[in-house]
Amino acid sequence: MAHGLSEEYEELRRTVEEFARTEVAPVIGDYYERGAFPYDIVAKMGRMGLFGLPFPEEHGGMGGDYFALCLALEELARADSSVAITLEAGVSLGAMPIHRFGSDEQRRTWLPRLCSGEALGAFGLTEPGGGSDAGAPRTTARLEDGEWVVDGTKSFITNSGTDITALVTVTAATGHKPDGRPEISAILIPSDTPGMSVGQHYSKVGWNASDTNELVFDDCRVPEANLVGERGRGYAQFLRILDEGRIAIAALGVGLAQGCVDESLRYAGEREAFGSTIGSYQAIQFTIADMEARVHTARLAYYDAASRMLAGEPFKKQAAIAKLASSNAAMDNARDATQIFGGYGFMNEYPVGRFYRDAKILEVGEGTSEIQRMLIARELGLPA
C-alpha cells in the first residue's frame, strides 16, 4: 500500500481543510446549540462539488471516487460532525443507491440535483424496534394497479426532513420467498408524495446541526417504475451500500479523532498550571501521544479498506475493521480531550465538548460496534 496522497488527492484535502477551518468552524457552534440545519454551509459545499465527488460527470458529478469523498469527510469532521454526516448521508446513503442500482431514467432524473447539493436524498432502512435486525422490515409495499403502495415507519433517518430533501429510498417487504423469509425490495419515494409524512424530529445527544427524523408511510403510492434495482434484492443492495458507508463513517470518525488532537495540542500550549503550560507535563504529553497513535492507526485502516474497494477486491472485513477502529479512536480521543480541557471541556463554547457528544453515535450508527465484530468474525470463518 502506497503511503502519502497523490497531488490530486492532496489538493482536495487542503481545499476542504481550509473550508472547514474558515467557513465551518467559526459558525457551527451556534447552529449546534440551536439545533438548526446549516443550509448556507450545505449550499457552499454543493457549489464546491462535494456532493458530486464520487459520481460521473455525465450525471453532474465531479468524476472522482469514493476515497475522495472519504478525504473530504475526514477534513469536515475535524471541525464538525453534523456537517460531515450531512455530506456522508447525502452521498453514500442518499445518492449512491440510485447510482449503483437505479435505472437509467432514475439516474438522469435524480443524480444531477443530488450531485449539485441543491437536493438531498435519504436512506430508509432502520425501523422502530428493529435496530440491527434490518432484514425483517415491518414496512410493506404491494403492487396495485401499476403502483407500489407503501405502509410503515422508518426511524432515525438522516436528511429526511429538510427543506431540500427530495427523496428517500426505503426497504420494504414486497412478499415472501419460498422459504418463508420476507422478500425485501428498495423503492424510491419522492418527498412530496401524498401519504409520506415527516414524523417526530428527534432531540439528540449529538449531531445537533444535522437533520434526523422519523418517516411515516400511510397508503403512500408511487409508480411501479420507482423500484430501485431488482425486486427482492433490496436488502442485498443495501448491505453493499452499508459496506461502502462504513468506510465513509470510518473517515468521519478519524476526522473527529484528529480534531480532538488538534484542539488538545492548541490548548496544551496555551493553558498554564503550576507555573508551566500543561503541555510540558508528561501526563499530558503521553495522553496526546496515545491520541495521535489512535488516529494514525484508524486512518491507515480506512485507507486500506478504500483502496481494496476501488481495486475491486473484497473489502467487507476491512470496512468493518476500519469502522470499529475509528469509532473507538473517536470515543477515546473525545474523552481524553475533554479531560485535558478540564472544566472548559464541559462547556459548549469549546469544540471538544461537541466532539464528546458526537463521538458516541459512531459506535452505534450504520452498524453497531457489536455488528462490526460479528462481521469480522464471520469473515475469519467463525460460525455464524
Image: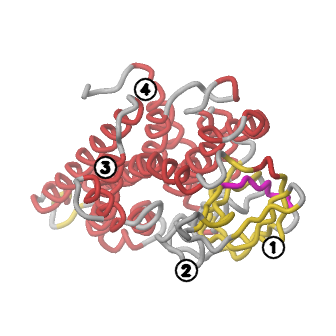
Label 3 or label 4, whichever comes before in sequence order: 4
Q: Is residue 136 above or below residue 193?
A: below
Which of labels 2 and 4 is toward the front?
2
Distance between the Cα atoms at labels 1 and 4? 45 Å
Q: Main secondary structure of the magenta part?
A: strand
Query: In the image, which disc is placed on residue 129?
Result: 2
Name the kind of residue labelled 1 in the image. Asp
Name the kind of residue labelled 3 in the image. Lys
- Say if mark 2 contacts mark 4, CB within 8 Å: no
| Residue depicted at 64% across the width and 29% down the height | 61
Q: Provide the secondary structure element on which disc 2 rests.
A: loop
Q: Provide the secondary structure element on which disc 1 rests.
A: strand
Q: Provide the secondary structure element on which disc 3 rests.
A: helix
State the residue position of label 1: 218
Label 1 or label 4, whichever comes before in sequence order: 4
State the residue position of label 4: 9
Hey, which residue is sitting farthest top in the picture? 7
Q: Is residue 31 visible?
A: no
State the residue position of label 3: 317
Label 2 or label 4, whichever comes before in sequence order: 4
In the foreground, 303 or 268? 303
| Residue depicted at 65% across the width and 24% down the height | 57
Instruction: Choose top left, top right, bottom left or bottom right for residue 235.
Output: bottom right
In magenta, the rendered stretch is: 186-193
**Quadrant for the C terminus in the image:** bottom left
| Residue depicted at 78% across the width and 56% down the height | 163
